[in-house]
Image (spheres, rainbow, N blue to C red):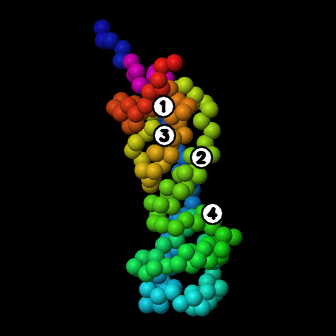
Amino acid sequence: MAEEIINRVANSKLITFNLEDHYPQGQRLIFDLSKWLFEGFVLKEKDFRDQAKEHDWSQYQDKFIALNCSSDAIVPAWAYMLITTYLEPYAKKVVIGDLENLESHLYQDVIERLDVTDLKDRAVIIKGCSHKPVPKNAYIFLIKKLQPVVKSLMYGEACSSVPLYKQPKK
């Protein structure tokens, strides 16, 4: 008679935390300031302000925006600030940087708002593989959020996880 196969992973008390489940929905865009610079390198204040006034900002409604300059121009801080004043009524989030930087900020916001009280003194495995763009910083933010609460933290899949943290014995 054959022995019954028992799925120990399914029967374990491990809780899998998948950052992908918390992916902020919405379109991400890069707003490249170099397009508004003279020859892509020189910011002429009057021209820059005129372009900002004439631009259709409503196209950024409910979008996540990363402000950057793709040229090697030195862009003063006030230029990013000015663009942000125009985006503020429309965009969900505005950051300076690239798309990875934007994702990092979005995940930081999500993780800060997470209620993790149900994970108190539990063994948690942070799922590693993802199909959505989860920045490495998101994993760091999650560790900072979970470590003071959980009994143990692992990374990967239940069948092949890497131990990260174990609560000291009291």
Mark 2 and mark 1 lie on one chain; the one further toward the N terminus is 2
> Pointer 2: what residue?
112
Mark 2 crowd level (few <14, some 14–19, many ≥20, 10 Å Cα)? few
Residue 143, labelled with which disc?
3
> Pointer 4: what residue?
92
Is residue 155 shown above or below 104?
above
Instruction: Residue lying at the far top in this picture: please name it.
Output: 1
Magenta region includes residue 10: yes
Q: Disc 1 residue type?
A: Val
Q: Gap in Å between the C-alphas at discs 4 and 2? A: 17 Å
How far from the left and from the top, in percent, is residue 34?
A: 47, 81
Q: Indicate left or right for 1 with 29 as reference.
A: left
Residues under numbered marks 2 and 3 in contact, where contact means CB atoms less than 8 Å apart: no
Q: Gap in Å between the C-alphas at discs 3 and 4? A: 26 Å
Q: Residue at x 40, y 33 (%)?
A: 164
How far from the left and from the top, in percent, is residue 36?
A: 51, 85
**Magenta region, residue range:** 6-15
Element marked by disc 4: loop
> Pointer 1: what residue?
124
Q: Gap in Å between the C-alphas at discs 1 and 4? A: 31 Å
Q: Disc 3 residue type?
A: Ile
